[in-house]
Image (tube, rainbow, N blue to C red):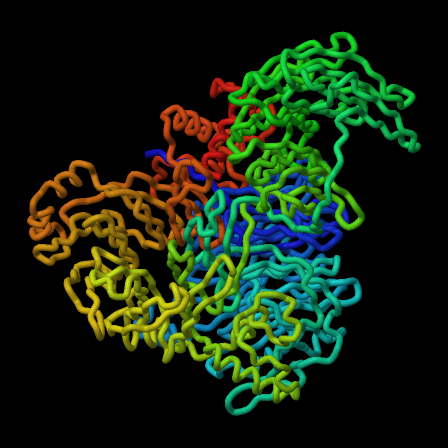
Amino acid sequence: MYLYNLTLQQATGIVSAINGNFSGGKIQEIVVARGKILSLLRPDDLGKLQTLHSVEIFGCIRSLAQFRLTGAQKDYIVVGSDSGRIVILEYNKEKNVFDKVHQETFGKSGCRRIVPGQYLAIDPKGRAVMIGACEKQKLVYVLNRDTAARLTISSPLEAHKSHTIVYSICGVDCGFDNPIFAAIELDYSEADQDSTGVAAGEAQKHLTFYELDLGLNHVSRKWSEQVDNGANMLVTVPGGGDGPSGVLVCAENFVIYKNQGHPDVRAVIPRRADLPEERGVLIVSAATHKQKSMFFFLLQTEYGDIFKVTLEHGNEGVSELKIKYFDTIPVTSSMCVLKTGFLFAASEFGNHALYQFQAIGDDPDVESSSSTLMETEEGFQPVFFQPRGLKNLVRIDQAESLMPIMDMKIANLFEEETPQIFSLCGRGPRSSLRILRPGLAISEMAVSQLPGVPIHPNGIRHIREDGRINEWRTPGKRTIVKVGSNGLQVVIALSGGELIYFEVDMTGQLMEVEKHEMSGDVACLDIAPVPEGRQRSRFLAVGSYDNTIRILSLDPDDCMQVLSVQSVSSPPESLLFLEVKASVGGEDGADHPANLFLNAGLQNGVLFRTVVDMVTGQLSDSRSRFLGLRAPKLFSVKVRGRPAMLCLSSRPWLGYIHQGHFLLTPLSYETLEFAASFSSDQCAEGVVAVAGDALRVFTIERLGETFNETAIPLRYTPRRFVLQPKRKLLVIIESDQGSYTAEEREAARKECFEAAGMGENGNGNMNQMENGGDDEDKEDPLSDEQYGYPKAESNKWVSCIRVLDPRTASTTCLLELQDNEAAFSVCTVNFHDKEYGTLLAVGTAKGLQFWPKRSLTAGFIHIYRFLEDGRSLELLHKTQVEGVPLALCQFQGRLLAGIGSVLRLYDLGKRRLLRKCENKLFPNTIISIQTYRDRIYVGDIQESFHFCKYRRDENQLYIFADDVVPRWLTASYHIDFDTMAGADKFGNVYFVRLPQDVSDEIEEDPTGGKIKWEQGRLNGAPNKVEEIVQFHVGDVVTSLQKASLIPGGGECVLYGTVMGSLGALLPFTSRDDVDFFSHLEMHMRQEHPPLCGRDHMAYRSAYFPVKDVIDGDLCEQFPTLPLDLQRKIADELDRTPGEILKKLEEARNKII
């Protein structure tokens, strides 16, 4: 089995973000790392975030930094990745690509403890960069320019210290003196020698300064001093002429200013009043804003509160450090303050946001200062504050993010043409159920009902610019049946098949030029657009009912001569020429010559596309794609200033050029009859369309996206969900650790309002308890989505079971679990006695704790019955079990449960579940169970899959096959009788299959392989499964599902990941395709190595050698190569570049 891997939606989570002028000039841009993808974003004039460029680097981006050489106009990007190399990139705005300026190898590949890449620090003057590992190694590279003003990089200088863990590094701003780097370090050499653990308890963190002597070309440890053991982050303080230099050390509960030869200046970080005492406050992200005369820092805590930190400084150094409450936004992984007055917040989970500064926090607010620091017997006196609504910031745009996808199912609950993807996303108060549909999002501007419209089939009316009208009438009784025109030419087809061609002459008159009789009635026609600098277009396309399309010439020399004929599978219904202008690089980042495409919508619902030779009019390179059950009608529209095509079949599609690819994507909208471009003051690029008896004006939202989404907010972190396909409902289980229940939160909130003298404000209603995700909740001063939940003790759990109707987005039933129980698994089950019909089984744990060691009070399996046609739940009974039931599954009218390392079969009793059979021989913890016929496929948390059988007559469960490789499972899916697909926590996807002869033997053996099992072999099963597919995705896969996303398409395995990306594995059906794509992949590996220095083959084989999977993401980078390289690869494959692009398009169209 060979598979083709293709990412359908790129990762949406962001690991780190930096800002600067990467394209030169004054424009502020943001570079974000999304795991293995590097993207360049820019806020446009309206404050909307636009993605300029996005590239997969086939490696893991661990750190990003930007620097600028003194006096230069643009910033360079430094990337620390898992390639064992430091890479410096420059953004080339002409070609819209990242160019690799330097790549220096220093170590092995992979994310290792002592190989640098985890941390990056830049000298603020851009003279040197330090790249550090988690432990031991730190390297410094000197940056300079040569005589041609090109960037140069030196050999690495070592700043290693063995037995030392590094927590954070940063550059120290000391003007043009020797560059200095600061690091928080912990020496564990004594702790390593001392087995009693005393030395480990006394280990002390230090702040160390490293000086790079530019004269001697050498790095030395300059200064080291003890620092709080809670220190976790360093922030550079401006120096030189701009400030006092030194660093801010962010530690638990404190921010400390430190510099060599300067006393510590310490201030306490204000705490939320409702925070339990056991919890400290840590800073998780920081941003600096620096102007000529002033600077300040924005520091965000792990609870989402942002504080503005300012320093009072003079000649003697820093006299005071102030920390003032600024605003609260969801917790970020990175913050960027742009010089244009924006704050970009890359959220840790959930959607990212772009905020605009309304003020910079100069108004009085809760403030702590180093001068008012009070020390008591218990330690330093805390400062308390209460979060409030946004005052200094206002959100102006957000970027959707699915991170993390917790669970995903694909089903057609809405009875649309294509199935919907239901995914559980987010964490805590920012969780949501997102319904993804393939296609572009639409925003509707206006809808109005239509009166009747008169048609004019008897002539042409030409309205001149000055308002004069010329009229031309049809001869005799004939009527105009079809018409095609561009700005200067008109062709009409009369009934009977006569074509008449008109031109607008120099004076602006409409002149009849030529007539031509076709052999039969004309089905459709279109004139190509007039090329730049020409008087007229040369080509006319005519579709006839005899299943042909003809290209006719409109040149005066050979007017109405047939240039070429193309036969098609069904009579054409509509024709459209689409001109693609030549581009070298340009905005879409790909070189392609000018092209003219002829598109035809056929009556059988197929869109047929072919290339028209600009000189001869010959047709070549034809492609077809089934769009829907109605014949597509084609209309020309403008998208981002370029010509695009709207195809209206049983659903509308948009064909447009995006980043060098021609994309044909469905629009998530109802069936349309006719459409045309529309432009007004309110909407520059709109489409006006007729749907039924209404006129609709809409615009097309973010281009280049594969899916659009509808989000339904949830209460706690979603864990799992099940579909009820008959009733079209979802049952979702949600649980959070260390939170309060909705009732407790509501009571605390009321108290807080009354204390603040706000009264209740009419807010005690139920829907406030849901985090009503909208910003429109202006009455609610503290929306949970914005502020997070108040934190409780870590051993306190909250959890609920929700029944949701996705069509109305309404929750029909919500059960909160009481006394510290949390739900972990769910399934629907039909027991033998049909008394209750379908029941719901939920596995819960009470009082679960993970630290200092894993413990729980009890586990339970709840059984609920559905009432009101499945819309609400009633508890039948709950059964106590000895562990956490992490997996439940129906099996032959009974319930299978995985409880710790025990697989147990239960039947339904009146008061509780009754044990029927069990097997205790699983190695660790069962986390997934799937069944098919009499086989049970069990997934273990760290030992891959076990194939089991249940013998009814002997009432025995036994394992007949297992895997030889230890795999830490995160997702599993049953493919067929002998095959399972799984994913592990290191980002690999793999398929295991039981060899055919073993499978047959077990099925034919009257004991079902039981004799062998009883003999046992090396504590394992008698048979082993084989790995038939192996691939490193590079992102932890959390759910696998087999589905077909297009009507009549083949099935593929879809996967969702922690970073919020969606991908597909499509099985190849022909050996030729396998050969073609594996050769293309091989050439791409050689000619176009990944951007950040990782070897593509090594990356895809990071843990296990890649087996039988071809990487479509690499193959799809083919159109972005320079044209000569495309030709070179195509020649070696005995193809043309056009044929390769066609194959890539076909492969993608089989999936989506």
**Does residue 700 appear left or right of residue 82 in this picture?**
right
Above or below: residue 335 compared with residue 1081: below
**Does residue 988 appear left or right of residue 702 in this picture?**
left
Write down the quadrant of residue 1107 in the picture. Answer: top left
Residue 303: give x, y in percent of width and height. 55, 72
Q: Outermost residue toward the front?
A: 477
Front one among 655 and 1037: 655
Q: Is residue 1110 visible?
A: yes
Residue 298: give x, y in percent of width and height. 65, 68
**Residue shown at 67% from the left, 84% from the top:** 371
Residue 80: give x, y in percent of width and height. 53, 50
Q: Outermost residue toward the bottom?
A: 377
Report the number of numbered marks.
Answer: 0
Front one among 442 and 1147: 442
Q: Is residue 225 visible?
A: no
Above or below: residue 829 compared with residue 571: below
Above or below: residue 72 compared with residue 1150: below
**Does residue 365 appear left or right of residue 209 in this picture?**
right
Residue 653: give x, y in percent of width and height. 59, 38
Above or below: residue 134 compared with residue 859: above
Front one among 266 and 455: 455
**Residue shown at 58% from the left, 19% from the top:** 545
Locate the N terminus by quadrant.
Answer: top left
